[in-house]
Amino acid sequence: MATLTYVYADSTAVVGPLASFSEPHSYDLCEAHGQRLTAPRGWEVVRHEVDPDAILPSTDDLLALADAVREAARPTPAIPDVPPSSGRRGHLRAVPVLP
């Protein structure tokens, strides 16, 4: 898989690793089309090859995920009982309409 990004002003097409989010003027390509892509005459094609071992999850990624799961699983502290209010909420109040 690859992502094609192009810039008309520079007459450049860039084929690189699969993007993690969508951007204007970018398209995801299957492996076969990413390798065979050609550009119009006068355009430059830049290809960014990525080492597959460099994009594997690291132990830091796994530890961060485990910490996030632990944090989400912690019980939330009980909310103390709030005494009934006087009917007024913050700085807002109702104003009667005059005839």
Image (spheres, rainbow, N blue to C red):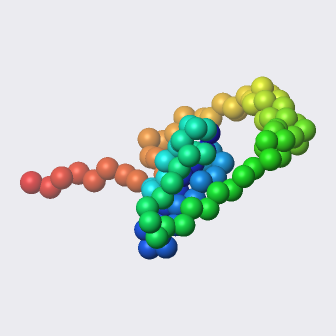
Residue 69 percent coordinates (x, y): 78, 30
Q: Using the rendered image of the protein, determine whether residue 85 is visible from the camera's viewpoint.
A: yes
Which residue is outermost to the right?
59
In front here: 94 or 56? 56
The image quadrant of residue 74 is top right
Q: Quadrant of residue 68?
A: top right
Drawn side of residue 27 relative to residue 18, left or right: left
Q: Residue 28: x, y in percent?
A: 53, 43
**31 lies left or right of 58:** left
Q: Where is the C terminus found, in terms of image quarters?
A: bottom left
Vertical comparison of 47 with 19: above or below:
below
Farthest residue in the left direction? 99
Quadrant, the N terminus: top right
**55 sits to left or right of 80:** right
Q: Nearer the viewer, residue 65 or 12?
A: 12
The mark tally for this picture is 0
Q: Nearer the viewer, residue 65 or 38?
A: 38
* Frontmost residue, 97 versus 2: 2
99 on left or right of 78: left
Question: Where does the image place residue 11, in percent across and percent down from the top left?
Answer: 47, 70
| Residue shown at 68% from the left, 56% from the top | 48
User: Can residue 91 be spotted in the picture?
Assistant: no
Q: What residue do we see at 14% from left, 55% from top?
A: 98
Residue 82 position in % (x across, y down):
62, 35
